[in-house]
Amino acid sequence: LPYPVITIDGTTASGKSTVAKEIAKVLGFTYFNTGALYRSVTWKILALGYDVHDEEKVVEACRRLNLRCVIQKEDSFSQASILVDDQQPTEKELRSSEVNEAVSIVASYRKVREWLLPFQRELAYKEPLVVEGRDIGTVVFPESPYKFFLDANLEEREKRREEQGERDNVAQRDRLDISRSSAPLLCPADAVKLDTTKLSAQKVVEKILDILWKKG
Ligand code: C5P
């Protein structure tokens, strides 16, 4: 890899996004939320009227989609945004209960994941990155020396989602993500694992930055 890539994987609502964004800010790296990529594709598939349980049709429809990535730069923050057929779904659309319910089903299809793999890797040839997801340290950037894995107990994670006012079946999404045969959610053997149940996001950020400084 020409640029450094920091990978942050973990369970649903374990604090990945908050932490990954902050680390990207501090280091001046680009933040790439791969969950948003799976969500954008799922949103489009639903909008086109497909039944997400029909694997063959979904795979076929995905292959016809035109995905693009644009780097949006604000004052102290740069992030990757996804366009599907030149449309950028809103945050509200990406986090709707329909997408929450369907995304782990679409993400379980091997051919969907294979299709998205080069797309995710490409970005690392343009920018230093902080990438969050479920299989980033295991499958997308296995060669990265900077891997982290976040988890927290289920009760705490459900509480966090509720506080965000989202209808999201955290346990079910975890179950699907852990049990799928293609790139299941698991802690990479060489990742630093952090339990965030009793830690503030700021504390987690401090711990990760501390580990990164020590690595040099
Ligand atoms: O991170 P977020 O909760 O937005 O991700 C939504 C869903 O996308 C996950 O539950 C998972 O099914 C899928 N996903 C994945 N691999 C990734 C990132 C997300 O399978 N690297």
Image: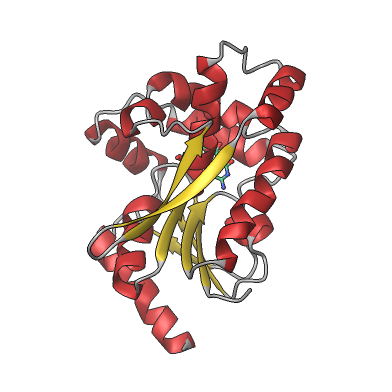
* Picture quadrant of residue 79: bottom left
- Above-or-below relation of 67 to 49: below
Q: Position of residue 155 (x, y in %)?
A: 35, 38
* Picture quadrant of residue 68: top right
* Picture quadrant of residue 136: bottom right
| Image point (48%, 70%), residue name | 128
| Image point (43%, 88%), residue name | 214
- Above-or-below relation of 202 to 177: below
- Above-or-below relation of 45 to 63: above
Q: Position of residue 25 (x, y in %)?
A: 30, 66
Q: Is residue 150 visible?
A: yes
**Pick the front one: 3 or 19:** 3
Q: Is residue 187 visible?
A: no
Q: Is residue 175 left or right of residue 13?
A: right
Q: Position of residue 44 (x, y in %)?
A: 52, 24
| Image point (22%, 35%), residue name | 163
- Above-or-below relation of 27 to 8: below
**Pick the front one: 36 or 2:** 2
Q: Position of residue 6 (x, y in %)?
A: 50, 68
